[in-house]
Image (tube, rainbow, N blue to C red):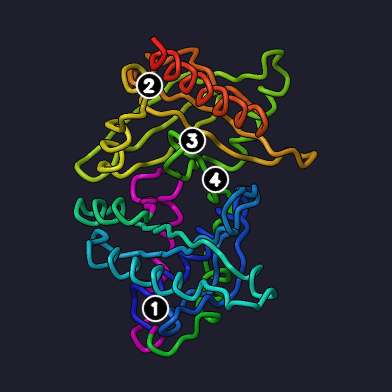
Amino acid sequence: MKEHQAREIIFEEKVKKLLQDSNYINIVEQNIPGRSSSHGINSYGKLNVPTAFIFPLRIIFQYKYYAKNKVELMHVRDFGGIIADISETNYAIQGDMGNICDRYNYTGCYFSATAFSREAQEYAWAHNIFMVSLERIGVMQPILKKIDSFVSGLSENIINNITKQELLEGYEREVDEENIIPEGAIGIINDVYPVMILGKNGWTKPVIEEATKSEINRAYIDSVYRSENQFEANFELNFMECSAEFSVPITVVEKLMNREDNETKNNVIFNIDIPFISDKGIKKFVSLEVFLEGFNRGDYTNKQISFLTLANSYLRYFLKDLIEETIQISRFHF
C-alpha cells in the first residue's frame, strides 16, 4: 500500500465508529460488488430510521486522507462511477419473487480529511454525492494529527508490506487516543443535506436532558460562530457549557440558500434536524435553527432548539403542504 492509503485505512475506521455511535446509521461490514467488478467497498451504512415508499437505502462511503491536497473533481467523478456501477446490480428477475427483498437504493457520501475543490463540489452536488470535510473541525484535529504522525513514522518497507489488519492493530497499540475521541451526530440541513456535527464526548447528553426536563421541550443555544474560506463554511454552536461544530462546502451553502423553496433565507441560515433514538427506543428529531445574524460570540442569544417526535415532524410537513394546496385552490376559484 501507499502512504496515503495507510492514512485512509485508519481514517476510515475512526469515521465509521463516529457514524455507528451516532445511533442514526448502522455500519454493515459486507462487500458490495459492482456490475463490472469489485470496487473495494467493504461496508455500507443503513439508516436506523426507515423511509417509506422507497427500497431500503444503502449509503456507500468514501474515505480519503490526502496529506495536503484537496479532493479534486477527478476523485469525486471516480466515486460517482463506483456508485453508478453498484446501482446497476439493483434489478429483479421477472418471476423471481425471492429477489424482491434484495433491491436497494444507493447513495454516496464522501468523507475527507481535507477540503473539496469548487469543481469537485459542483460535480458532487449535480450527481447527488454528499460531502463531509473534517479539515476545519477542531475536535478532529488531534486524531488527524495522530494518524498522520503514526503513518509518517513507518518505513517505506513496512508500508509496502503491512496488511490492513496489522496496520490497524499497530495504530491501536502504539497511539493513545484517550480523552480525544469526539462524539458525532448526523444533522439534516433544510430537509436536504446531511452534515456531521461533532463535539467533545458527551456533548449531546446535556442538550437532550435539558430539553426533556423543559415543559415546552426545548433547549437554548447561547452563541454561534461562523467562519469560512473559499472552500467551506464552518459553524460552531455553543450551548449549556458545551459546544459542537460542523462544516458545509461553500458551494452547497450557496445553493441551499438560493433554493426557491427556502422560506427562511431572510432571517435563518439553516434549519437542521438531528434524528436520534431515545433510551426507550423512541425515534425523535432535534430541530435546530441557525440564524443568519450573530456570527460573533455573544451576539446570538436565546435561539431555540425544539425537540419534536418523528410523528410531529411528519405532521408539520403534511400541514404545510396542505395549507399551500388550499391557498392554491382558493386562488384558482377567485
Q: Find out whether the residues at labels 3 and 4 contact each other: C-beta distance under 8 Å.
A: no
Residue designated by label 1: 154
Depicted 43 relative to depicted 285: above or below: below
Give the secondary structure at mark 2. Answer: loop
User: For the residue labelled by badge 3, is the local secondary structure a helix, a strand or a loop?
Assistant: strand
The kind of residue tagged 1 is Leu
Type of the residue with mark 2: Thr
Q: Residues within 10 Å of mark 2 (few under 14, many from 20)?
A: some
Q: List the residue tagged with mark 3.
A: 244
For image coordinates 60% across by 53% down, the residue present is: 47
Q: In the image, which residues are magenta? A: 130-159
- Label annotation for residue 184: 4
**Label 3 CA crowd tier, 10 Å (few <14, some 14–19, many 20+):** many
Counting residues from the start of the chain, the first of labels 3 and 4 encountered is 4
Asked if residue 158 is among those painted magenta in the image, a careful observer would answer yes
Question: x%, y% of residue 244?
Answer: 48, 35
| Viewer-side label of 1, 4 | 4
